[in-house]
Amino acid sequence: MKRISASRELLLLIAIALLLALIASRFPAFVTPANLAAVFNDTSPLILLAIGQMIVILTKCIDLSVAANLALTGMVVSLINIAAPGLPMVVIVAIAIGFGILLGMINGILVWKLAIPPIVVTLGTMTIFRGVIFLLTEGKWVNSHEMSDAFKAVPRTEIFGLPVLSWIAISAVILFWIVLTRTTLGRSFYAAGGNPNAATYAGINVGRTQFWAFTISGALAGLTGYLWVSRFAVAYVDVAGGFELTVVAACVIGGVSIMGGIGTVLGALLGALFLGIIANALPVVNISPFWQMAISGGAIIIAVVLNAQANRSPGRIILKRAEHAT
Amino acid sequence: MQLEIRPDVSIRAASDIDPLLSLAGITKTFPGVRALSDVSLKLYPGKVTALIGENGAGKSTVVKVLTGIYQPDEGDIRIAGEPVRFPTPQSAESAGVTAIHQETVLFDELSVAENIFLGHAPKGRFGLIDKSAMTTRASDLLSSIGAKIDPGATLKDLGTANKHLVAIARALSIDASVVIMDEPTAALSQKEIEELYDLVDDLKAQGKAILFISHKFDEIFRIADFYTVYRDGQMVGEGAIEDVSEPELVKMMVGRDVSQIFPDRDHNIGDEVLVVEGYEHPTEFAGIGFRLRRGELLGFYGLVGAGRSEFMQALFGITRPSGGDIRIDGASATIRTPADAVGNGIVYVPEDRSKQGAIGALPIFQNVTLPSLSRTSRNGFIRLAEEFKLARKYTERLSLRAASLDTEVGNLSGGNQQKVVIAKWLATQPKVIILDEPTKGIDIGSKAAVHEFMAELAAQGLAVILVSSEIPEIVGMSDRVIVMREGRIAAELDRKDISPESLVSHAAGIGGVEQ
């Protein structure tokens, strides 16, 4: 597994390098360290959400409600900030994570206890979360001037030359890399998605494992919700509309198998960066944004084809064995 | 065990009438396994030929050859003397060969008439399906087999028996001259079975050649004209049914060369470790009770569908039984989940290792330690060194050959995957290990290794439950055998009473066993 996934991620790294080289040939300024740092910062919300989504997909589920969770949590902390401008930012961040966890747990409970297919559950909660924003605000925006300065300052505060937003993304990558490779919970994500039957036999509660995956995805979406509204200094119903599909795309490009059980934090990170670079570079080199969609779409298909081929041979061996046993 | 081959009988049969369909010298191999080796089969018009053999004797494979699903490596198929080839299922159908399968392959959401004519519906103007003609013909077909089923009903609303009749009607909707019935009575009640016999008599009267596959001797003697016996992919006997007796057929089925040698075992049987009483399930099994001692190897034999695996899954906490008690080391235990079972020292190595055993995308060491993670971790953090140590210890014990413990299990051979699964369970240090068909689909060499290993486990004081459909394995390995039939214990045999014949008679319910 190490070898295949390593080569898969290496391949993606090479693709990113080629992409950067191509952009640099037309617009050298794009690859200066300062600009690359800016691109990374801009991609940080996508990285955070892709990590959560990857964990959910690992367990053979999908979370379509991440962007709606982000928007609702963002709105909730904005409203709290208006109501209590003096509240310390640590509390605001804690509320954002906690509220995101709550929303993620709703998904998780429905998938675990009621055994509803995750795509249906999260399609439903996606709509509900957006609806709740409307109920909270009657469609009104929360604008920059209503937010406290401290509220808006957090993501852009620089530490060692990088904004807090970037540091949060980096921390999440490290944290969840450890969770997935070094903890029993991380192992059970892979087992539950890789072969739910075998995982059950090994004493893993697959439903509960999926619940935790949704909870983590919710936590990251909630945190990103605060970072998003404070960075753009605006909160409204349609914040990050349709962004859930970009998040899933980042995972797929990053080599996460939509069938579950295969994927790494590094893959999700690289998948997100690939999309982030395309989104930032194409306007600069004067390519229409419509091409951006086409390129992202092409990248998804190529990634899926590569993954399918990497996974093909073991499956065939098993089938042949099973066949002659009858 | 020398079996009697009766050349006089087959010659007489062949000289009376020419076979409608004949197979000669058919060989079919799969990687590592020779499923059919130079087998023949003859089906006569207006006659029923019973195909008899143990699980894995090659019956299903020959049906797949006859219906164009498998291509034989060698040999020829003749219909009325003319050589034919069936490169696709459609070509077998158009040559007039049709099969009613063991598991009926129908479509729940379609109507009865649509199911019957799927793929060959009567066409009307513009090549569209002529629905009224289809309904009329469907209702004719159904009434011809005595089925009172509305052709417009949706299939999912029918009961099992009626679904089966639809499958039969579907088989007959093709103007077939050869009808294959693969265990057609398995899902039917006694009354429905009688109706099926009448139907078979009708088909015989129409001059169709019928291949009848069954494990039940009473119905073979009731319905068949000829028999053919397969064993281990070879034909070992054929003839007219009136010239053969039940014991002779059983002997042909199970008798074999003593090519498999089983390890010598010290029968070092210790204290009672597991007591099961009155285990029952609403649909799968009832009244299962037995005692198991340390160092004992208890075989579970039965035909496919006798409820052995279903019971084992309940014992392991995968399914919930509706009643029954377990005592482990004298203390009563509650097993609601597999984690409970593992915690109580019971582990289950399932039959279908690709579905239930190994996790293909995870490396060997992670597969091995999966149920033991509580021992290789502290506060939820995995200690990789411990994990590797545990995985190495148990894979080495099984002499698993792989490049490294990092290798993905999906890339290993079937035998090695099986070793990973067994290593995984041994690493939990169990008291009772349940092995469900541990040698199914693996080559002879690996089989011997698994047998030796089972003997070693028992010698170390583990109580081993061996669920197997392979008679030699059960006979060669078990200290005691429980035979299951139709979800109940049909017999419990001590070492001295274990013989292929006794196993088959109890499993099939023949020879003075109550019915």
Image: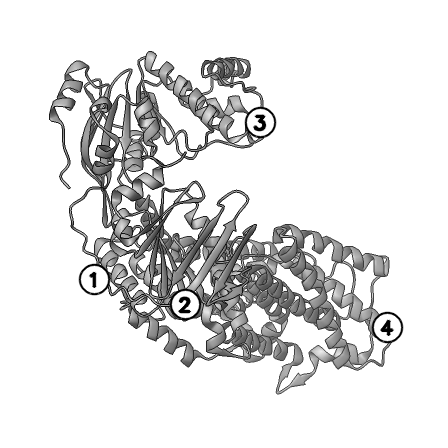
Q: Secondary structure at mark 4?
A: helix
Q: Residue at x 55, y 64 (%)?
A: A54
Q: Quick one: label 3 or label 2, which is nearer the N terminus? A: 3
Q: Which chain is disc 3 placed on?
A: B
Q: Residue at x 37, y 32 (%)?
A: B183
Q: Is residue B158 visible?
A: yes
The type of residue carrying mark 3 is: Thr
Q: Nearer the viewer, residue B397 or B481?
A: B481
Considering only vertical position in the picture, is B336 above or below A90?
above
- Count of marks placed on residues: 4
- Tell me, yes or no, whether the two marked residues, 4 and 1, touch with CB atoms within 8 Å: no
Report how far apart the C-alphas of labels 4 and 3 lie in the structure.
60 Å
Q: Secondary structure at mark 3?
A: loop
Please state, as top left, top right, bottom left or bottom right, where the C terminus of chain A lies in the image.
top left
Q: Which residue is mark 4?
A: A82
Report how far apart the C-alphas of labels 3 and 2 lie in the structure.
50 Å
Q: Residue at x 40, y 17 (%)?
A: B198
Q: Secondary structure at mark 2?
A: loop
Q: Are marks 4 and 1 on the same chain?
A: no
Report how far apart the C-alphas of labels 1 and 3 lie in the structure.
58 Å
Q: Which chain is disc 2 placed on?
A: B
Give the number of the disc on residue B154: 3
Q: Quick one: label 1 or label 2, which is nearer the N terminus? A: 1
Report how far apart the C-alphas of labels 4 and 2 lie in the structure.
63 Å
- Tell me, yes or no, whether the two marked residues, 1 and 3, touch with CB atoms within 8 Å: no
Report how far apart the C-alphas of labels 4 and 1 lie in the structure.
82 Å
Q: Which residue is mark 2?
A: B431
- Tell me, yes or no, whether the two marked residues, 4 and 2, touch with CB atoms within 8 Å: no
Picture coordinates of residue A29, whole percent (x, y): 55, 74
Considering only vertical position in the picture, is A274 above or below B179?
below
Give the number of the disc on residue B264: 1
